[in-house]
Amino acid sequence: MSDWRVPGFTSTGSKRPDALFGAAGGEPGEDAGLPERMLRASGCRVWDARGREYVDYVMALGAVALGYGHPAVSRAAEQAIAAGVVGPLPPVLEEQLADVLAMRIPWLESVRFLKTGAEAVAAAVRLARVATGREHVLGCGYHGWLDWSQGGEGIPVTTRALYAEIPFNDVEGTRRLIREAGDRLAVVVVEPVVVVEPTREWLDALRQETTQVGAVLVFDEIKTAFRLAIGGAAERYGVRPDLTVLGKALANGFPLAVVGGRADLMSGVARTWISSTLATETVALAAAHATLEVFAHEDVCGHLHRMGIRLLHGLHRLHHKHGDVLTGVGGIAEMCFLHFANERLSRDLARGCAARGLLFKRTAYNFVSLAHDEETIDRTLGILEDVLGAISA
Ligand SMILES: Cc1ncc(COP(=O)(O)O)c(C=O)c1O
């Protein structure tokens, strides 16, 4: 038994040392050489508890696209702190941010704010159930830790029975499941990118089949919005979901998520209860506002794409050179990772990188940011090459 006061080592599961660096064989925290906890972050750099500096591609699990501590975002957050953070009335900023979002992402006709991605997807599912009067849900990808999409201990079987998974990019399988669920189906929730890009046929099938059975189509764009394009995969691939969920990079690391889309569906909030005390605190709202300003004035997504392509091409070169360790490259330019011949090799790579000042995820996904430049990417590829050479040897 570990004696950590925070069981499981940390409250964010994907930041556990064994998630990032592979199991050490003992308890987390026993491998003193690894960067297990951090003191601060700036741009694409992170300093661990011992003050050691790293170039980072975890980027707070994709929650930061502009770089850590972006000055304009921090300034906006500081002003919101100076203005009192919260109060008895909804802040002016809430409706203003909804306007800006609708301007940048026109299919967000109306929106509600929440704090976490999991809450926002759950809200989308609730609104779909309200609109359709149906209960069944089909999902694809990860949608957070809440009961509706999870299985296993602690989840009532009756809740689990209302949820099934559709296979990513499998047109026939997806069609069949949607048609089988038919008039019991409230909603199809998909992550539009899962390891690879979606095919046109799959996206078209999702749109056509959900419309056909009268179910709501939700795009969970928590990783993809403000990264593939401001409006995420829907914008890049030209598909229009009924509802969209945003989170992560939306406020560049401040806790904020959005459920939004067709005004008729969103008006369902009047028929159910979706509300959270701190959904309207102003620091995250201000941070999101400032983040959107940066996106309006700089081609952030273009930068992420260029840097991502440079990284991705380099990873492909490494795969060809080190086929004994690597079996492929996953993801897309903006969010990518390496496939390893086995778990042990992925662990060796992540640990070897950390020892050389690089935090590179061994599983989905590594994220570039506005703070990653060509030189950083090239140096990263050099470190990966060194580590792979040492592993191969
Ligand atoms: C696609 C997707 N949906 C939902 C979530 C859950 O978001 P949160 O962890 O903010 O609750 C995540 C988190 O990784 C995600 O990637």
Image (cartoon, grey):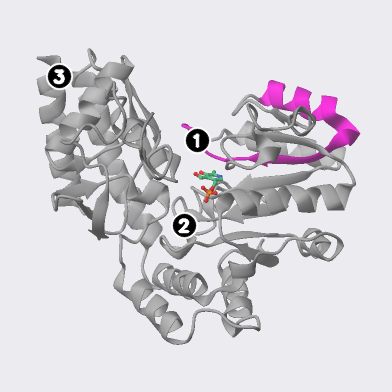
Left or right relative to 18: residue 145: right
Q: Which mark is residue 370?
A: none
Kindly identify which residue carries mark 1.
197
Q: As shown in the figure, which amino acid type bears the numbered disc 2?
A: Phe
Please tell me which residue is depicted at 41% across the width and 76% down the height of the picture: 77
**Which residues, given as a range, are shown in magenta?**
171-196
Kindly identify which residue carries mark 2.
226
Image quadrant in which you'd find residue 91: bottom right
Please tell me which residue is depicted at 86% across the width and 61% down the height of the picture: 271
Q: Using the numbered discs, state the Cα–Cα distance from disc 1 to disc 2 in whole angstroms.
A: 16 Å
Q: As shown in the figure, which amino acid type bears the numbered disc 3?
A: Ile
Q: Position of residue 219 (x, y in %)?
A: 63, 47
Please tell me which residue is depicted at 36% across the width and 56% down the height of the picture: 302
Q: Secondary structure at mark 2?
A: loop
Q: Using the numbered discs, state the Cα–Cα distance from disc 1 to disc 3 in whole angstroms.
A: 30 Å
Q: Which mark is residue 391?
A: 3
